[in-house]
Structures are given as structure tokens and as C-alpha cells.
Image (tube, rainbow, N blue to C red):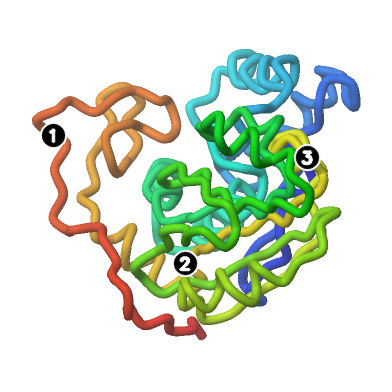
């Protein structure tokens, strides 16, 4: 990970920790190369997940490290999710990393699992929100005292004014993680969670990147996710595995998670639906 607050607490005793890949201002290149080589020696591969709004210098550092080490055992996964959504995805990949999947499958599973994360926020204003389409009417209403907005950024952008509509939620069983910023409201836990029929709500500290992403510090960020490793395992297992013709690693989906090479179209087929429906049981792994 590229930020320590994107590492959520584990949901079980088996979930491994995550390593922090520091920004250039915090660590010199030689030290960063040494740290990465140590991680490769200890674990065999590294899956580096970072948000799409990362500082350009930090992203260049990651690519420089991979290039200097000339390693196809380093996956660089740029994730276009809100901060809390990125943190949820990282925890799921940490869970998968101790399953009997190859490194290539774990890396390419990030794109699959991101589709099942419903990430949004409750905001007091959308005046500075530029990552989700906002109409002129919503912008005008955001200046009205007491206005609050429910925003879903992923998987399908949606914006409502609280009291005038509902956010479209997942049609499968989930848990909800909530990070409270500088906004006082029980809408997320009292209204959204029951409407989405989430099985449990977990609260975590606010993330440092969230105010910048959402355009305000007066917000409450939330993300619905698949909590059970057995369900995640089943989902990933249902997708046909292929072999990357460029680096030779296993993958699922249409792109190699390690080298980013696309899969040839005629080879991209699946023996499973890869779809979960409302009522899918949430079984707790033992």
C-alpha cells in the first residue's frame, strides 16, 4: 500500500498485514529498492495497490522500482475507487493471498472484486465534487442550509438529495464499513444500511485522502463489501484461469495482473457466472 490508513484492521486472525511503499519525499530510491527486494525475497511476489489520485511522483517511483529490478513478480494495480473502497479491496486481496491461488490470479482478481464494492459517501455539499457527475440543480441545492447528499461513486455513479430518493445498493449479502468525517448524521447507519440489507456495520477512523477525494471534510464515507473469504474464494474460483502469453503467469479476466498484458479475445471465456445475488449466504470461514 502507498498509505498506512488504507490498511484496514483484519476481519480474522488469518488475514496478513500489508507493507507500506513510501513516497519519494519519505524515502530515497536506494532504500525503496532494498525494501522491495526484501519483500520479494520473503514472499516471492509483491502486489502494490494504489489509488488513481496518487501523487504523480509516487506513481513514478513505483514504476521506477519495477523497472530497475526488472521483475515480473511486482504487480502495480492502479485502482479508481474512493479511498475507503481502495482500503476494502486491499483487505480482500490480503485475504486471498493466503489461499491456494497463484500470484497472477490474486493480482488479476482485483478488477473482479472491485465490481462488488459499492463505495460512496454522505456529503453536506457537492459544490467541489468533481469525481461523480453533478447536475446544476444539485450544485444549486448544495448551497441551501441543511442540505445533504447521498453519493454512490462505484460501481455506478448516482447522486440523491437526502429525503428525495434512494441509492441503488448491492443485490447480494454484504457488510458495510463506515468512516465518519466532520459530519454529524445517522443516515448511513440508520437509513442506508437497512435499505441495503447489510448484515453488519463496522466503523473505522476517517481516511486522510477522503476529504480531497469527495471535495469536503464534512462527509461520512461508506463501502459495502463481500465480508466472507469463502464467498470471495468461490467467486474467484468460478472464473476460468488462463496463462499470460507475455510473462507466463496465471490470470483471470482479460488482462494480466502482473505485467498488464491483455488476454487475446478468443481466449477470454469463463466457466462460471461470477455473479452473486441477494440472499447469497454470508458464511464465516473457520
Residue at the (65%, 62%) spot, across then down: 16
Identify the disc placed on residue 267: 1
Distance of mark 3 from mark 2, alpha carbons?
Answer: 28 Å
Neighbor class of circle 1 (other Cα within 10 Å; few <14, some 14-19, many 20+) is: few
Which quarter shows the N terminus?
top right
Q: Is residue 156 visible?
A: yes
Residue at the (78%, 60%) spot, across then down: 180
Which is closer to the viewer, label 3 or label 1? 3
Left or right of 201, for residue 168 = left
Q: Which residue is mark 3?
A: 216
Q: Which residue is mark 2?
A: 226
Left or right of 62, for residue 57 = right
Q: Is residue 48 visible?
A: no
As displayed, is residue 232 above or below residue 38?
A: below
Residue at the (42%, 25%) spot, across then down: 259
- Regarding mark 1 in the picture, which secondary structure is present there? helix
Q: Position of residue 120 (x, y in %)?
A: 58, 51
Distance of mark 3 from mark 1, alpha carbons?
Answer: 45 Å
- Regarding mark 2 in the picture, which secondary structure is present there? loop
In this orientation, which residue lies closer to the viewer: 147 or 238?
A: 147
Amino acid at each position: 500500500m502507498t498509505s498506512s490508513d488504507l490498511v484496514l484492521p483484519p476481519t480474522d486472525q488469518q488475514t496478513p498485514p500489508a507493507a507500506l511503499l513510501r513516497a519519494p519525499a519519505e524515502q530515497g530510491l536506494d532504500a525503496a529498492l532494498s525494501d522491495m527486494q526484501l519483500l520479494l525475497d520473503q514472499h516471492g511476489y509483491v502486489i502494490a495497490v494504489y489509488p488513481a489520485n496518487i501523487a504523480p511522483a509516487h506513481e513514478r517511483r513505483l514504476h521506477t522500482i519495477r523497472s530497475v529490478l526488472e521483475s515480473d513478480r511486482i504487480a502495480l494495480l492502479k485502482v479508481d475507487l474512493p479511498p475507503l473502497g481502495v482500503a476494502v479491496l486491499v483487505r480482500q486481496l490480503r485475504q486471498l493471498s493466503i489461499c491456494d491461488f497463484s500470484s497472477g490470479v490474486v493480482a488479476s482478481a482485483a478488477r473482479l472484486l472491485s465490481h462488488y464494492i459499492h463505495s460512496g459517501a454522505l456529503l453536506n455539499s457537492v459544490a467541489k465534487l468533481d469525481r461523480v457527475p453533478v447536475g446544476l440543480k444539485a450544485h444549486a441545492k448544495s448551497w441551501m442550509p441543511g442540505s445533504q447528499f447521498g453519493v454512490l461513486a462505484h460501481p455506478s455513479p448516482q447522486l440523491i438529495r437526502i429525503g428525495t430518493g434512494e441509492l441503488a445498493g448491492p443485490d447480494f449479502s454484504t457488510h458495510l464499513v463506515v468512516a465518519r468525517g466532520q459530519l454529524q448524521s445517522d443516515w448511513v447507519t440508520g437509513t442506508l444500511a437497512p435499505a441495503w440489507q447489510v448484515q453488519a456495520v463496522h466503523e473505522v477512523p476517517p481516511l486522510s485522502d477522503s476529504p480531497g477525494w469527495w471535495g469536503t471534510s464534512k462527509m461520512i464515507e461508506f463501502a459495502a463489501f463481500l465480508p466472507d473469504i469463502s464467498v470471495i474464494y468461490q467467486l474467484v474460483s468460478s472464473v476460468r484461469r488462463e496463462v499470460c502469453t507475455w510473462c507466463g503467469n496465471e490470470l483471470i479476466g482479460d488482462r494480466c495482473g502482473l505485467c498488464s498484458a491483455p488476454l487475446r479475445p478468443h481466449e477470454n471465456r469463463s466457466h462460471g457466472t461470477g455473479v452473486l445475488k441477494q440472499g447469497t449466504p454470508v458464511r464465516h470461514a473457520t
